[in-house]
Image (cartoon, rainbow, N blue to C red):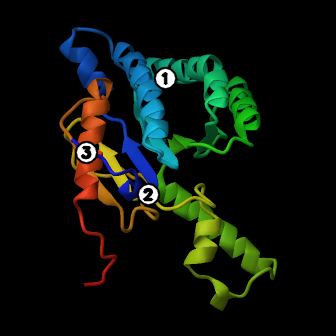
């Protein structure tokens, strides 16, 4: 399967789904699947760099995921903290710029501190931009942007008739980044689940039945190859 680097997406978003089902099939607890999913994250970040992807956004924990059992939520946050402590030095050495997108307020003080340290360490890196979406929801992001713009109008920093897509883009968590060209979802579900709903207006969507812990280079290349064979018209002919 041949891949042309010049025709690859600049920004890929991935809805990492299927950790729990993967664990259940092995008669293991759900957190076992989440830990396996972290290993896949490590591999996919390396692959994204290998194929010269500019931005990789991974949907790790949605605003709706707080509804899950407390033990699972607590375990997920613990795993995320472990990931930061173990991986950030390697991300730094590989020139990856690490960012968190989402509402950090509900996160523990310790986890927020770990996030700040990771972002500070890698802020000047010039390679792959790695966004991890934590406590993220597309609708919440849009509401946040609308409130920010409304305050700008109240403060007389802009006029109402100046509000346009560029202003909106500047108030989103993905400010300064290109919109995702390709969104991948694993596990066979066929929906976006509140992921980058403003930014994905013209994204190509690709779905696979493969569960996230089993997502590998072969599947990743299948998605890239499919993307290269699509014709993107953006509403034109």
Closer to us: mark 1 or mark 3? 3
Which is more toward the observer, 170 or 27? 170
Q: Earlier in the sequence, mark 1 or mark 2?
A: 1
Q: Is residue 174 above or below residue 117?
A: below
User: Toward which corner of the image does residue 213 lie, by quadrant?
Assistant: top left
**Residue 233 appears at what percent x and percent y?**
30, 76
In the rendered image of this protein, does residue 164 appear above or below residue 43? below
Chain-order first, disc 3 or disc 2: 3
Image quadrant of residue 90?
top right
Residue 150 appears at what percent x and percent y? 68, 74
Give the structural element (helix, strand or loop) at label 3.
loop
Tell me where residue 215 appears, x and y as whole percent: 29, 29
Q: Farthest bottom residue?
A: 161
Placement of 4 over or under 62, stated as above or below: below
Q: Tell me the residue that label 1 is attached to.
A: 76
Which mark is first along the chain, 3 or 1?
Answer: 3
Q: Tell me the quarter of the picture where residue 67 sits.
A: top left
Local crowd at mark 3 within 10 Å, few (<14), some, or many (≥20)? few
Residue to which mark 3 is pinned: 2
Which circle, 1 or 2, is nearer the viewer? 2
Q: CA distance from mark 1 to mark 3?
A: 37 Å
Which residue matches tag 2?
180
User: Distance between the Cα atoms at labels 3 and 2?
Assistant: 22 Å
Identify the residue at horizontal 67%, vertical 73% (top origin). 149
Disc 1 from disc 2: Cα separation? 26 Å
Is 56 above or below relative to 144?
above
Residue 33, percent across and down? 34, 18
Q: Secondary structure at mark 2?
A: loop
């Amino acid at each position: 399967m041949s891949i042309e680097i010049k025709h690859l997406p600049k920004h890929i978003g991935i809805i990492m789904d299927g950790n729990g089902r993967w664990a259940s099939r092995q008669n293991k607890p759900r957190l076992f699947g989440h830990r396996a999913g972290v290993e896949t994250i490590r591999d996919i970040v390396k692959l994204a760099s290998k194929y010269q992807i500019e931005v990789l956004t991974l949907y790790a924990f949605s605003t709706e995921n707080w509804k899950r059992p407390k033990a699972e939520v607590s375990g997920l946050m613990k795993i995320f903290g472990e990931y930061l402590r173990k991986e950030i030095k390697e991300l730094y050495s590989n020139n990856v710029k690490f960012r968190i997108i989402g509402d950090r307020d509900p996160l523990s003080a310790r986890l927020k501190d770990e996030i700040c340290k990771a972002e500070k360490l890698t802020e000047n890196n010039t390679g792959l931009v790695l966004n991890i979406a934590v406590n993220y929801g597309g609708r919440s992001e849009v509401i946040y942007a609308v409130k920010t713009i409304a305050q700008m109008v109240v403060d007389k920093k802009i006029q109402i008739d100046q509000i346009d897509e560029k202003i909106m883009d500047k108030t989103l968590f993905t400010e300064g980044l290109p919109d995702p060209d390709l969104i991948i979802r694993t596990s066979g579900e066929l929906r976006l689940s509140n992921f980058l709903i403003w930014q994905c207006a013209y994204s190509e969507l690709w779905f696979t039945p493969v569960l996230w812990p089993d997502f590998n280079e072969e599947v990743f290349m299948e998605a890239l190859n499919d993307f290269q064979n699509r014709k993107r018209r953006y509403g034109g002919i």
